[in-house]
Image (cartoon, rainbow, N blue to C red):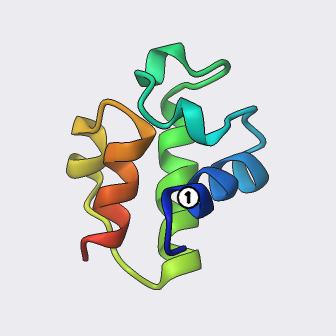
Amino acid sequence: MNTIDDFVALVRDHLGLPVATEDAERPLDQIPGWDSMYLLWLLTTIERETGRSVPLPDLLQASNLHEMYLLAVDR
């Protein structure tokens, strides 16, 4: 996962959400189907795919997928 495109593909392919790169800046409550369970699934997917730990409190503060991506690659 090297780019925001890769991250969005991970969200789309592993979580099954209909997102595109253009949705990365969209507030999470505007992502169709997004809920708190997806946050937990995304956390475990990020950690499994990257081998990096991402603190849950940091992800909880993210307001969009782009901010989550920055947390995932900034470790």
The front one of 31 and 54 is 31
> Which residue is found at the position 30% from the left and 47% from the top?
59
Q: Quadrant of the N terminus?
A: bottom right
Which percent across, then down, holds residue 57? 21, 48
> Which residue is found at the position 38% from the left and 80% from the top?
52
Which percent across, then down, holds residue 72? 37, 65
Q: Is residue 63 above or below residue 16?
A: above
The front one of 48 and 65 is 65
Which percent across, then down, holds residue 17? 72, 35
Q: Is residue 56 above or below residue 49?
A: above
Q: Is residue 47 above or below residue 28?
A: below
> Which residue is found at the position 31% from the left and 45% from the top?
67
The extreme bottom residue here reads 51
Q: Judge from the rendering whether residue 50 lies leftward or rightward of residue 68; answer left or right.
A: right
Quadrant in which residue 61 is drawn: top left
Q: Quadrant of the C terminus?
A: bottom left
The front one of 20 and 14 is 20
Quadrant in which residue 7 is drawn: bottom right
Q: Judge from the rendering whether residue 67 lies leftward or rightward of residue 44; answer left or right.
A: left
The extreme front residue here reads 22
Circle 1: is it few (<14), some (14-19), or many (20+) Cα within 10 Å? many
Q: Secondary structure at mark 1?
A: helix
Hey, what amino acid is under mark 1? Phe
| Residue linked to disc 1 | 7
